[in-house]
Amino acid sequence: MCENSVKEEEYEEKLCRTKEEKERQLQLLEAVFKKPRVVLHRAVVSPDLYPEQQEWSAKAEQQEPEPPRIKDEDEPDPTYVKEEVTLELPRFKEEVKEEPQAPCLEEEEQVAEIPTSPLTGVNKSNFAKLDYQSKWNLIHKGRPTPELKDLLQTTGPKVTRSFQAEWYNRKDWLCGCPIRNRLFCFPCLLFSTCENVWTKIGYCDMKNLPRSLTKHERSTSHIQSQIALKTFGTTRIDLALDEQQRLNASIHNAKVKENREVLKYLIAVTCFFAEQDLTFHSNDENASCSNRGNYVELLHAFAEKDAKLARLLETSALFSALSKRIESDLIEAVADVIRNDIKKEINAAPFVAVQVDETTDVSNKAHVSVIVRYVTQSDVACKVKEALLGLDDASDDRRVPAIAEYVLGVLDKYDCVEKLVAQSYDGAAAMSSELNPVQEKIKEKVPEAMLTHCWAHNLNLVLLHSAKWMPVCSAFFKTLAGLGTFFSQSTKRSSLLQDVVKRRLPRAAPTRWSSNSRLLRAISMYQADVRAVFRIMGENPDSWDNDTLMMASGYDQWLSKASTCFLMMVSEGICDETDALVSALENKVMDIGHCCARIQDTMEVFEHMSLEFHTFYERFEQKCATLGLADSESPTGKRSVREERKQIYYNILDNVTFQMRSRFGHFDQLAFFGLVDCSKFSKMSRHFEDAKLQSLLNYARFFDFVRLKADLIGLYSSHIVRNECKTPGQLLSFLTEKDLIQTVPEATKLLQLALTVPATTLSVESSTSALKRLKLFFQNRTDRGNLSALAIVSVEKKRLLKLKERKEDFYNKVTESFVQMERRVDFIYM
């Protein structure tokens, strides 16, 4: 390249010397032919005069000169020299037309004055004199690309070559002049400091056009001109030199810096209130109220210790009012930073499972939440995570298409629809039903997204929805839950209960049947003592408020009914079997065959209980007699009270059995869990169970089954793996820590799938942990502004704290998100 550059410089110097010599010769020729040229131009010369000249002129007209040939930029153009000497000769006769050759320097100046040429006045010196806007307009207009039909290469009367407009498409720098009928280099015309055939006279040698094009675009001057053209306008030198604008920019940037410093305080306060689930505003905020709200009051408390903050809060029009719009946008900006971090983790995860829940806030408005479960992987360990992706009001439209569209829309925002492998639903019974059209709608989009719950959670849903199916059972469990809440909401009531019963009653949770089971057993065991508490309240009316007395009387009356005792005994018998089943499922969760067998045994117990009604009813009558419960109910219709209770008894058991079959019947699809049951690795190393591998067919597009089987056999046969890894989570962490992911890639994916599908006891606690935090958030919220963003910040507290460890990076990300919401120029540097 250096050698080529030197040659180019030598060529340019040689060319300049040649042009100077041409100009000198031209002046001499003009001096020689000056007088004849003037006479001939001003008078008609008789043909008899100067016969030799007339003969010469006729011959000159008959002869068709060979077109000029310009070889390249490395050598002087001989045609150009010839034109300089002979162009003036045809002026001995006026009628002789100018031949289409390269013009001399004088003619070149005359042609440049023609206003119709697209390249008129286009050269380095003229372009440099233009102002910035004129330069921009000229470049923006683009290079002229005329057809140049007269640019031909001829041999005698025959045209051998012609210019094709296709060359413009091949060379983005090539342009043409229809007046001169020549080709030029557009970047070099504007920016090149060296004169050559492509910038001065134009190129017309069609025979050597390809070679000359290649030669020119390799030259240093052309490359520099191209760079100057392509980068024009990126740096406004004229603006940079404008002192006033630089001063304005400096003042603006100083204000932006101050505003961003104040914004850090606002971001910190916003995060504090969102993390602590505190309200931002008071119920009464107006100009006359001394309480400006928690958010503003805390900022002004900071300002008491920071003079700069106090000055800006008082004097800056941007912060003086501390508008709710700024506060709302800051909450949204913090939530956006959290969402981006979640999206980054989800993008790295191979699978996701979604949990859709219907949650009610303090104003009894229904909200649909979307929580995803996935596995994250670092250099040293892996972790199962769940994150809240979306929360929106569902009060207006709770129809199936609306819910399904919302769920898929949220997943699509995080680019994880194709990764969906499982879906589960809580909340309303209709949403979690096996026949629920919502999950069917989602399966139409993602066939692999099977409906599933963890074992224990699924059993909770079975019992809860079985109870809600029958109005008499639904009323019973609601009253039971209310009784537990009656004591927990008052320390005075709880103290009396503790004095009489010597224990507290557990509270019932709406999504946990086990809590209902504990409350049921406690009341059944201490039924007489609990009634004694209610009687004490009634005997001392002056010590209690009216609401307490009315509720105590009602609960006492409810416990005194034989029908309450009947439902309590039936439910208690069912709880005895289901609690044992939950314990078994928790211990053997990876053994799908064992779990299915235990579920079948439990259903057979319920069927046997339905045959033992007479025995059950005898125990019921004995307990009523012991507690002195009066059977005040009268029969309806022709059936006796006993027959009506018998029907209720059968309906309860049949409903529980049906719910268990419908919810657990498809769990054979999870047989592949047995492939990662670490407790059976030794056994499976001797006999591989292909049937379990076949259960993965629903996820066939994710796996190479031949490689998967080889990976699993390799893990089964490893003594180190069998000794150190007891759970799938430990095994995945072991593979990550020992850098074995690439060694067994398909087995790694199977472990990630098993941990993603919410089927383990850990899945229950982990996946509902986000749900628990969300429900707690709704319990503590009294203001409803920006609910979705606040919920994400509140539920994702741990993630927020981790992001805040890198303070400057966190503040910058929140600030950039905040600025982009309304293009706030007061926070944007120039």
Image (cartoon, grey):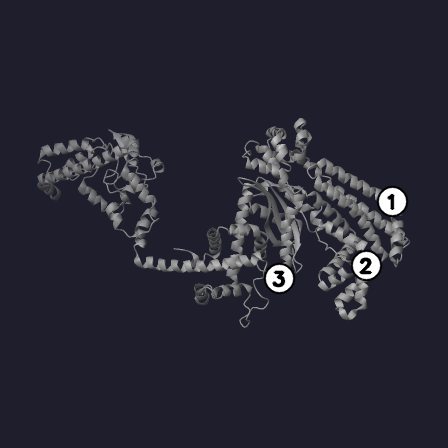
Q: Position of residue 671 (x, y in %)?
A: 69, 35
- Of labels 2 and 1, earlier in sequence is 2
Residue 192 appears left or right of 61: right
Q: Quadrant of the N terminus?
A: top left
Is any atom of residue 636 visible in this view? no
Reading the chain from its start, which is encountered first: label 1 or label 3? Answer: 1
Q: Which residue is mark 2?
A: 529
Quadrant of the rendering where the C terminus is positioned = bottom left
x, y percent for residue 311: 44, 66
- Residue 782 is marked as 3
Q: Are marks 2 and 1 in contact (CB under 8 Å)?
A: no
Q: Is residue 395 above or below residue 728?
A: below
First in sequence: mark 3 vs mark 2: 2
Instruction: Say which amino acid is labelled 2.
Output: Asp
Q: Residue at x 38, y 59 (%)?
A: 254
Q: Residues within 10 Å of mark 1 (few under 14, many from 20)?
A: few
Amino acid type of disc 3? Thr
Q: Determine the CA span between mark 3 and mark 2.
A: 38 Å
Residue sitting at the far top? 686
Question: Would residue 218 be visible to someone looking at this image?
Answer: yes
Q: From mark 2 to mark 1, how far is it between C-alphas?
A: 30 Å
Name the one closer to the observer, 5 or 518: 518
Identify the residue at horizontal 85%, vertical 44% (top origin). 610
Compared with 299, 5 (above or below) is above
Instruction: Please tell me whether mark 1 sits on a helix, a strand or a loop.
Output: loop
Query: The residue tagged with tag 3: helix, strand or loop?
Result: loop
Give the class, few, some or many, for how many residues have Cα within 10 Å of label 2's Cα (few <14, many ≥20): some
Name the residue carrying label 1: 612
Residue 453, position as x, y percentages in the image: 68, 44
Of labels 3 and 2, the one closer to you: 2
